[in-house]
Image (cartoon, helix red, strand yellow):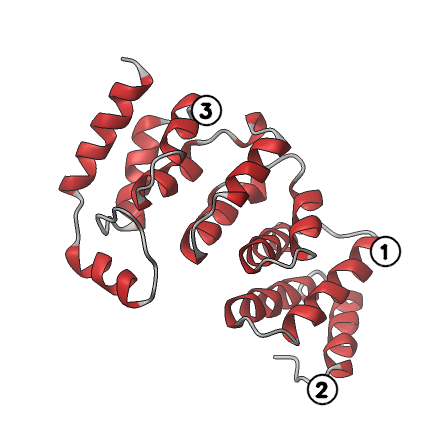
Amino acid sequence: MDINQQVKEIKLSFRLMMDGMVAKSMRDKGLEYKLNWGATLPRLREKADEIGKNYDLAIALWKENVRECKVLATMIMPAERMLPEVADIWMEQTPNLEIAEQAAFNLYQYLPYAPAKAYTWMASEKELYQLCGFHIISRLFMNKQEPNERGINEFIDQALVALLGQSIPVKKAAMSAIQRFAELGLVYERIAKSAIKTINLDFL
């Protein structure tokens, strides 16, 4: 079956997953999509498992301006095959917070160059880039990947900037990343606590 036909059939399958309540609640939260069936993430995950990893299909699905296509694309893209420039294009085309979070959790944290992307995106001036950067680094810390000295300084600097910024989602993501960082061990916990103190915040 050719890719276009596959995309067509996948889009038809979303009708069966349709959930008007979910779609409405997203609209109420300001998540606008050209098309949104309101399919739940577990249903999309089942669909992704059924399809398996598929680079060409992921690229084709991502191009669709449909919420479920974009989420599914992040689930079936093989991380080891995604080139840095493709990741940059996807990031550039990310429409909102939900897709940014899904891409970070389902895909970007597994990229072979994930740390480099995390640091670059955290330092961006764009909210969605920062959000993705902090989500990725959070996951890397959770998987016990310890940063080197330069990485520590850079992460702390960016996290403090985010915590003093205006964006609530980015603040939350930065705070969560600092908590994961502190969980790497006693030394990290001390660094996190003293950094947070410098901006007069309490460490949770």
Q: What residue lies at 65% left-to-right and 69% top-to-bottom?
A: 162
Residue type at mark 1 is Glu
Per the rendering, the mark at residue 71 is none
Q: Earlier in the sequence, mark 3 or mark 2?
A: 3
Furthest residue toward right: 149
Mark 3 vs mark 1, CA separation in Å = 35 Å
Mark 3 vs mark 2, CA separation in Å = 46 Å
Per the rendering, the mark at residue 200 is 2
Q: Secondary structure at mark 2?
A: loop
Q: Position of residue 175 (x, y in %)?
A: 61, 70
Q: Earlier in the sequence, mark 1 or mark 2?
A: 1
Residue 174 in which image quadrant: bottom right
Q: Earlier in the sequence, mark 3 or mark 1?
A: 3
Residue type at mark 2 is Asn
Relative to residue 21, is residue 115 depicted above or below?
above
> Are the residues tagged 1 and 2 within 8 Å (C-beta)?
no
Residue type at mark 3 is Tyr
Q: Is residue 174 left or right of residue 55?
A: right
Q: Is residue 28 left or right of residue 125?
A: left
Q: Nearer the viewer, mark 1 or mark 2?
A: 2
Q: Position of residue 190 (x, y in %)?
A: 78, 73
Q: What residue lies at 85% left-to-right and 54% top-to-bottom?
A: 150
> Are the residues tagged 3 and 1 within 8 Å (C-beta)?
no
Q: What residue lies at 74% left-to-right and 60% top-to-bottom?
A: 155
Q: Position of residue 92 (x, y in %)?
A: 53, 44
Residue 193 in which image quadrant: bottom right
Residue located beneath label 3 in the image: 55
Residue located beneath label 1 in the image: 149
Q: Secondary structure at mark 1?
A: helix
